[in-house]
Every structure is written in C-alpha cells, then in structure tokens.
Image (cartoon, grey):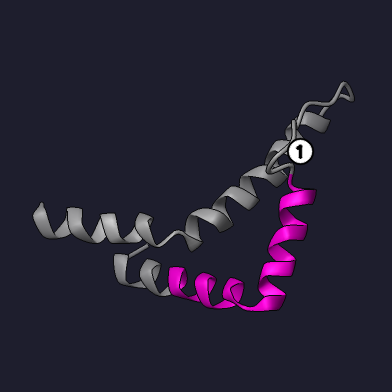
C-alpha cells in the first residue's frame, strides 16, 4: 500500500478509536483477543484461533500508535 494511503488509514483508525465508543470497543477487543492473557488452550486448534484474535488486536493497536508512522516518515525523509 502506498505510504500516503497507509497514513490516511492510520488516521482513520485513530479517529475511530479516539471516541468513547471506540475506546469501549477496543477494551472489548482486548479482552476477547487475549491481549493480556495467554492464548494457550489444550483444545486442538484453539491456540491458533486465539492467536489469530490476538493478532488482530495488536494490528489495531499498531495502527493507532502515532510513533509507528512518524518513524516511517522520518526514515523515508532521511533515506
């Protein structure tokens, strides 16, 4: 994805999750996505399923972190 489009998407994530409703949804996703708990399960396939959920929560958090995109802009500027 071109950097400009990625930056716009990043801004969209930040706007959505900056609201009170967005924060409520993010808390729910963190709980359901095992963001702060083990993803291990003795059930076959369940650990992988839980890791998939966790990965999505981590992606949302990555998209909301302004430092991830400011660094890329600085790296691009300085080659």
Q: Quadrant of residue 37?
A: top right
Q: Is residue 28 left or right of residue 5?
A: right
Could you tell me residue 68's position as x and y percent?
A: 37, 55
Q: Is residue 79 left or right of residue 21?
A: left
Q: At 40% from the left edge and 75% from the top edge, which residue is drawn?
A: 8
Could you tell me residue 29's position as x and y percent?
A: 73, 56
Magenta stretch, residue numbers: 9-33
State whether the magenta stretch is mostly helix, strand or loop. helix
Observer-nearest of 25 and 54: 25
Q: Is residue 19 magenta?
A: yes
Name the residue beneath numbered marker 1: 50
Q: At 36% from the left edge and 57% from the top edge, which residue is drawn?
A: 67
Q: Is residue 72 above or below residue 41?
A: below
Q: Is residue 6 above or below residue 59?
A: below
Observer-nearest of 19 and 52: 19
Q: Secondary structure at mark 1?
A: helix
**In this view, which residue lies farthest toward the top?**
42
Quadrant of image for the N terminus: bottom left
Q: Is residue 6 magenta?
A: no
**In this view, which residue lies farthest toward the front?**
20
Q: Is residue 62 above or below residue 36?
A: below
């Amino acid at each position: 994805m071109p950097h400009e489009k990625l930056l716009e998407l990043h801004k969209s994530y930040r706007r959505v999750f900056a609201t009170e409703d967005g924060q409520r949804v993010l808390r729910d996703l963190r709980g359901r996505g095992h963001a702060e708990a083990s993803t291990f399960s003795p059930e076959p396939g369940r650990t992988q399923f839980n890791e998939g959920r966790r990965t999505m929560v981590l992606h949302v958090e990555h998209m909301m972190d302004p430092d991830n995109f400011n660094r890329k802009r600085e790296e691009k500027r300085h080659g």
